[in-house]
Amino acid sequence: MFKCPKCSGPIVARIGNPGGIDLVGRFGDIRDSRELPIEWIEPPAKSPSAPQHTPATVAEFYIEACDSLHRGKWTSAAGMLRKCMEVALKEFAPDVEAWKLEKRIDKLAAENRITPALKDWAHELRLDGNEALHGTAPATEDLAKRMERLTHFLLVYLYALPAQVAQARTDRENGN
């Protein structure tokens, strides 16, 4: 039996312990331990996922950010969400010189690839992400959760919705 490092609730797990590691007083997430293979765990951990059609690299950053968020690592989550947005927008505005996220956001808005509301929100996330990464205070739970919501909506708007529209057009053309 273990204690959840985030909510302090109980976790029951059956684990292998081939090395005979002393588990008394062990701290951290049991899933992070490579030497203790988990056979089953209750309650099962929810695996985060990126919105459909998100490219693999962008999805990997988003999932890592969500995992940090779930573990209560607010600054890590905020940093990875900022990175996720940066990498996602580079795909849509590769001609904008490096390290110019502000210009990439503006370019996507000018091309109507994102709405004015998403543009404003993306700039907020950019500034909040900069503060989380470069400021002296750690990120807060509220900040990390707001950044996750925006990043999720950006990924839906940039990847999932266009793919769904394209599929709907294909279905229409095929008489479905």
Image (tube, grey):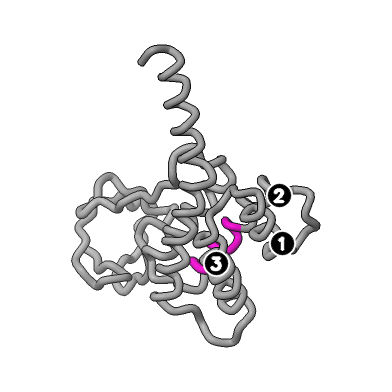
Q: Main secondary structure of the magenta part?
A: helix
Quadrant in which the N terminus appears: bottom left
Q: Earlier in the sequence, mark 3 or mark 1?
A: 1
Q: Amino acid at mark 3?
A: Asp
Q: Which element carries disc 1, helix, strand or loop?
A: helix
Q: Is residue 131 magenta?
A: no
Q: Position of residue 128 (x, y in %)?
A: 55, 75
Q: Position of residue 129 (x, y in %)?
A: 57, 71
Q: Position of residue 164 (x, y in %)?
A: 44, 33
Quadrant in which the C terminus appears: top left
In front here: 167 or 47? Answer: 167
Which mark is drawn over residue 103?
1
Disc 2 to disc 1: CB gap under 8 Å: yes
Q: Position of residue 146 (x, y in %)?
A: 42, 68
Q: Earlier in the sequence, mark 2 or mark 1?
A: 2
Disc 3 to disc 1: CB gap under 8 Å: no
How packed is label 1: few (under 14 Cα within 10 Å), some, or many (20 or more)?
some
Find the distance from the CA under tag 2 to the CA under tag 1. 9 Å
The residue sitting at 41% across, 65% down in the picture is: 69
Residue behind mark 2 = 93
Find the distance from the CA under tag 3 to the CA under tag 1. 13 Å
Residue behind mark 3 = 120
